[in-house]
Image: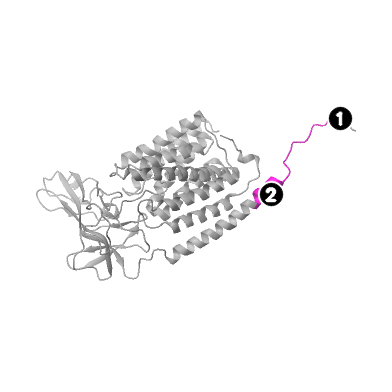
Amino acid sequence: MVDAVTLSRRFAVAVALLTGAWLVSPAVVPIYDGPGQPDQPYRYVVRPPGDTKQTPDPTSATATMPIRNGVNTAGLAYSGESGPQVRVYVPPGALQAPPGATSVQLTATPSAPQAPLPSDGTIVGNVYTIAVSAPGGPVTIIGSNDDQTPTIQMRAPTANQPGPVFEHFDGKKWTQSETIRAGQDIYQTAARQLGVWALVQLKGGGSSLGGAQLAMLVIGIVILAIVGIIMVVRIARSRSAPPARAPAKRSGARR
Amino acid sequence: MTAISADRRAPVAGVPMLALFFAAAVAIRAALHGPPGAGGSVWPGVLFGVLLAVAAAAVGTATRIDRRVAVVSLVATVVLVVPALAFSSARASLPLAWFPGWLAATMLVAPAEEAFLRGIVYDAVARRSNVDVAIVVAAVAFGLMHVPLYGWHALPLDTAVGVVLGVARMASGTWVAPAIAHTAADVAGWWML
């Protein structure tokens, strides 16, 4: 057991680390752990052909960001499903509000995929239109570095890998955006522009258990079996070995 | 509760052996994670928990429940949950019918992770070096095991959570305190984003 001073120092360090980690983590990283929280079935605006599940309509995400010194404070909008199908995080200073505006409204609205569709794959899930508005004029993105760029996360209908990528529609064509997997079925991108976004399963992708996963499974089982056998042998040996005893006290009398 | 002192017996598994076992269990869990859905992601986690629990039981570690453990558990739970409440927000309701099964799985997996990381791994590393290194090693392993599920973004937060749980282990002298705090934080997480 450790003394109180040492313990209180370790405790202070741990609390400081935890607070710091919360501050530097993206706003919507998964909280801690557990065996995994089940998601509700994906809610489509228009279900894909052959999918007969009955689900409620998808919801929009909204958030209001107060304006300070002409720019926004941080805002997080997420839709109401569990887990949310879309989340948009706007860091402070990312948006320039029109003069006189006291707040900016952020919305992410679902819609069904419509032509023109991406040529390099298939949209999975809904299309989300992300917009910011304020009374008195347009709102513009002014954030220039990564820390000031809005972040979009979307949940895909499945966690199948390889997963989809983000694509943005500029009114004429769809363009891929650098995508990271932020959860089992959650994908994230930095959005240098708002507007129409969707997750697109690229052509040739989408197997349920990829080769890498299968290899990982086989290697994991083999290692586990080897380690398990070694541990069982060691346990058996330690049980069969004579117990270590302290030297017996000599009485001095010999027979 | 029985008290099994790891120090009284020859180590069944050293740090490299435990690291291999852990990496293999993480790989299997990551490979088996299928599409989500009602309970869809629970079973790989349960298998993972069973593997870790079996290893912890085979190797043996100090197991105790007393007043000190209760106090440390309570403090660690508050430390984990309060910032989550401050930085997060209440999530939309999940169907309550899913809760009992998820709770049962959580009550298996979280203590199993703690028995392994803050139990036998902590013991093995502390025996080899010291408790500070043991806290860090177990915390880094805890952070890394979440990467296949959530991505690298979760690493800082989960590692920091691992440090908090490690300090709880040091303060209480047993893995039981971090197990209680871990389980409580996970259960609180059901209602958070």
Quarter placement of the N terminus of chain B? top right
Q: Nearer the viewer, residue A81 or B104?
A: B104
- Mark 2 chain: A
Q: Amino acid at mark 1?
A: Gly
Q: Which residue is mark 2?
A: A237
Q: Quadrant of residue A200?
A: bottom left
Q: Nearer the viewer, residue B135 or A70?
A: B135
Q: Amino acid at mark 2?
A: Arg
Camera sees residue B129: no
Give yes or no for residue A11 being in the magenta stretch.
no
Q: Residues within 10 Å of mark 2 (few under 14, many from 20)?
A: few
Q: Nearer the viewer, residue B14 or A216?
A: A216
Q: Which residues are magenta?
A: A233-251
Give yes or no for residue A250 being in the magenta stretch.
yes
Residue at position x 31%, y 68% in the image: A202
Q: Quadrant of residue A251?
A: top right
Residue at position x 69%, y 49% in the image: A237
Q: Is residue B57 above or below residue B20?
A: above
Camera sees residue B157: yes
Query: B31 left or right of B173?
Result: left
Residue sitting at the far right: A255
Query: Residue A72's spot in the image, x, y percent?
Result: 20, 47
**CA distance for labels 1 and 2:** 35 Å
Q: Nearer the viewer, residue A42 or A213?
A: A42
Q: Which residue is mark 1?
A: A252
For numbered disc 1, what is the local secondary structure?
loop
